[in-house]
Image: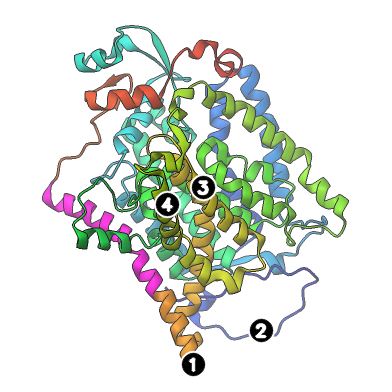
């Protein structure tokens, strides 16, 4: 796919009639998409599962009013997306997006391929946690909503022994709304149909993410797709050191230090696509936004998909709320935009519903503390932290500094990635792995624009300094590919060797096949005493 600069300029003002220019046949084969169409497509992708949760999981007396309220919020959000901070409507001349047909086809194929290879639907050998993802979809299909389990359905005697009880009910507890469209399809047409819809739904999310990323950097380039798949820190360096010194302690590719890990894009896709795809879309949406009047919805909906990622998105939203791009001419207008009814209603209602739902199972966050307490010697946290930041954050900050030094989102993302490693929540530290996603995705999208410029033959450097800078950028890109290439090697190597799949190791949380998963499931997916929780007393159907 040839790189094409076809994104409309977002500058304010009246359109000036430009002199027609000759286009090559390839460049002229474009589809003009109004910005509002792209914006509304992403908003609907994010909110359709939310509506399904309201109507299917909550009491009708609660779910129906919430659906109507959020339907109105979505309509306002879409109708207002072309208005700037002062309320002035931006013209389509400056906001329309011209998408080359070749990119529509190429991104669609890429999205399907990435979804398939990363294991969505478990049609190929899968990496970590897909046995859990498959069980979630199956139970959302097979059980009534809200999903309630009874220990009496467990047939494995080892599982019953671990649980210690033979009867009694527990509620399903997890951030699961990403599976709602697939689960509904599965209820109507069976599990395999639902599983296939999940693959298509995830592919649609990735496709929208690629288009939105191009719109954010104002150019269509294959490097957006490349960075989406391969973006990572420089994890290859510590892994090389460990190989040379023959270190035999516990570690994994992106977990080379105790308690500290920022995860590559592909690994997120291959393990927690339900959190990764919505988060990436939300960051792209925020980068494209023209005002702050509906950020309570566009950022707040992330809480329904990933409570951990919310920790990382708060600094970014703060930077956007008070940044120059979203600042009105009058301070009072800026404050009115921030405190809009849509923002307040979205934030309060989403927090009330999902906050009460997550609190119905407090055991999942019981494993926590300052990160240095998880080191054998707390003082070792200091050099580990310095090395970690130097490998996972600084390379992108240095590359992007000149371009982004005046962008408050750049500094907010940098600050978030500096702070997150200090605290640890859950045994595998979900705060670090998922809380870092918003900031990392901002760097991923922005860096794709820089890499595209470096690779553009028109920008070939002519000075020694220019060559060194370009070489440094490309070396960083080459090194960051290691985690994804390693995971692809494992996936395709396992397929070739015919390694057995573990996708049915769990089967259903209501009847667990292998006892080794029982303890984790009881801790992370079961809400004990749910009947007395606020959510199940007042909200759940």
Distance from the alpha carbon under mark 1 to that under mark 2: 35 Å
Quadrant of residue 482 in the image? bottom left
Q: Indicate the position of residue 309 as horizontal and vertical percent values.
A: 52, 43
Q: Which mark is residue 262?
A: 4
Magenta part mainly helix, strand or loop? Answer: helix
Q: Is residue 476 magenta?
A: yes
Dot 2 or dot 3, earlier in sequence:
2
- Tell me how the rendering is colored: rainbow
532, above or below 399, in the image: above
Comes first in the chain, label 1 or label 3: 3
Query: Does 533 appear above or below 457?
Result: above
Tell me, yes or no, whether the two marked residues, 4 and 2, touch with CB atoms within 8 Å: no
For disc 1, the neighbor class at 10 Å (few under 14, some 14 to 19, many from 20) is few
Q: So how many labels did they put on this image?
A: 4
Q: Earlier in the sequence, mark 4 or mark 1?
A: 4
N-term mark: 3 or 4: 4
Residues shaded magenta: 475-498
Residue beneath the point at 57% across and 19% down: 535
Q: Secondary structure at mark 2?
A: loop
Answer yes or no: do the residues labelled 1 and 2 have beta carbons within 8 Å? no
Q: Quadrant of the C terminus?
A: top right
The residue sitting at the bottom extreme is 462
- Between discs 4 and 2, the one toward the N terminus: 2
Q: Residue at x 41, y 44 (%)?
A: 378
Q: Is residue 51 above or below residue 198?
A: above
**Residue bearing mark 2:** 20
Residue 12 x %, y %: 77, 68
Q: Which residue is mark 3?
A: 420
Tag 4's secondary structure? Answer: loop
Residue 463, labelled with which disc? 1
Badge 3 marks a residue whose secondary structure is helix
Alpha carbons under labels 4 and 2: distance apart: 48 Å
């Amino acid at each position: 796919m040839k790189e094409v600069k076809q994104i409309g300029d977002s500058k304010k003002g009246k359109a000036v009639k430009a002199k027609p220019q000759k286009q090559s046949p390839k460049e002229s084969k474009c589809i003009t998409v109004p910005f509002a169409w792209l914006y509304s497509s992403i908003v609907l992708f994010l909110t359709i599962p939310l509506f399904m949760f309201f109507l299917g999981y909550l009491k009708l007396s609660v779910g129906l009013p919430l659906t109507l309220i959020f339907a109105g919020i979505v309509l306002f959000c879409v109708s207002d997306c072309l208005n700037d901070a002062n309320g002035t409507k931006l013209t389509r001349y400056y906001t329309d997006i011209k998408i080359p047909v070749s990119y529509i086809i190429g991104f669609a194929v890429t999205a399907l391929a990435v979804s398939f290879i990363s294991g969505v639907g478990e049609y190929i050998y899968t990496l970590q946690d897909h046995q859990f993802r498959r069980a979630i979809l199956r139970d959302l299909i097979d059980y009534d909503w809200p999903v309630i389990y009874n220990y009496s359905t467990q047939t494995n005697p080892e599982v019953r022994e671990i649980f210690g009880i033979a009867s009694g009910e527990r509620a399903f507890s997890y951030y699961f709304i990403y599976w709602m469209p697939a689960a509904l399809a599965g209820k109507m047409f069976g599990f395999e149909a639902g599983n296939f819809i999940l693959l298509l739904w995830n592919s649609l999310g990735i496709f929208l993410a690629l288009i939105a990323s191009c719109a954010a950097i104002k150019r269509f380039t294959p490097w957006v797709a490349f960075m989406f798949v391969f973006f990572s820190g420089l994890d290859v360096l510590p892994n090389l050191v460990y190989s040379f010194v023959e270190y035999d302690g516990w570690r994994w590719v992106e977990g080379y230090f105790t308690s500290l890990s920022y995860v590559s894009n592909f690994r997120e896709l291959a393990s927690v696509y339900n959190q990764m795809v919505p988060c990436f879309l939300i960051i792209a949406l925020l980068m494209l936004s023209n005002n702050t009047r509906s950020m309570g919805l566009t950022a707040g909906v992330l809480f329904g998909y990933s409570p951990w990622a919310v920790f990382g998105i708060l600094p970014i939203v703060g930077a956007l709320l008070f940044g120059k791009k979203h600042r009105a001419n009058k301070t009072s207008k800026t404050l009115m935009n921030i405190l809009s009814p849509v923002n307040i209603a979205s934030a309060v209602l989403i927090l009330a519903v999902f906050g009460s739902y997550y609190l119905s199972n407090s055991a999942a966050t019981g494993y926590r503390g300052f990160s240095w307490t998880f080191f054998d010697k707390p003082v070792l946290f200091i050099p580990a932290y310095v090395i970690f930041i130097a490998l996972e954050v600084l390379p992108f900050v240095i590359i992007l500094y000149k371009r982004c030094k005046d962008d408050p989102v750049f500094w907010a993302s940098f600050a978030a990635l500096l702070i997150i490693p200090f605290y640890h929540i859950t045994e595998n530290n979900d705060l670090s792995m998922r809380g870092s996603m918003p900031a990392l995705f901002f760097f991923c999208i922005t860096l794709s624009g820089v890499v595209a410029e470096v690779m553009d033959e028109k920008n070939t450097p002519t000075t020694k300094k220019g060559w060194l800078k370009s070489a440094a950028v490309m070396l960083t890109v080459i090194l960051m590919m290691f985690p994804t290439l390693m995971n692809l090697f494992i996936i395709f190597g396992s397929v070739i060797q015919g390694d057995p799949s573990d996708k049915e190791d769990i089967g259903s949380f209501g009847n667990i096949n292998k006892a080794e998963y029982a303890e984790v499931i009881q801790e992370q997916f079961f809400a004990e005493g749910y009947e007395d929780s606020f959510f199940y007393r007042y909200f759940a159907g």
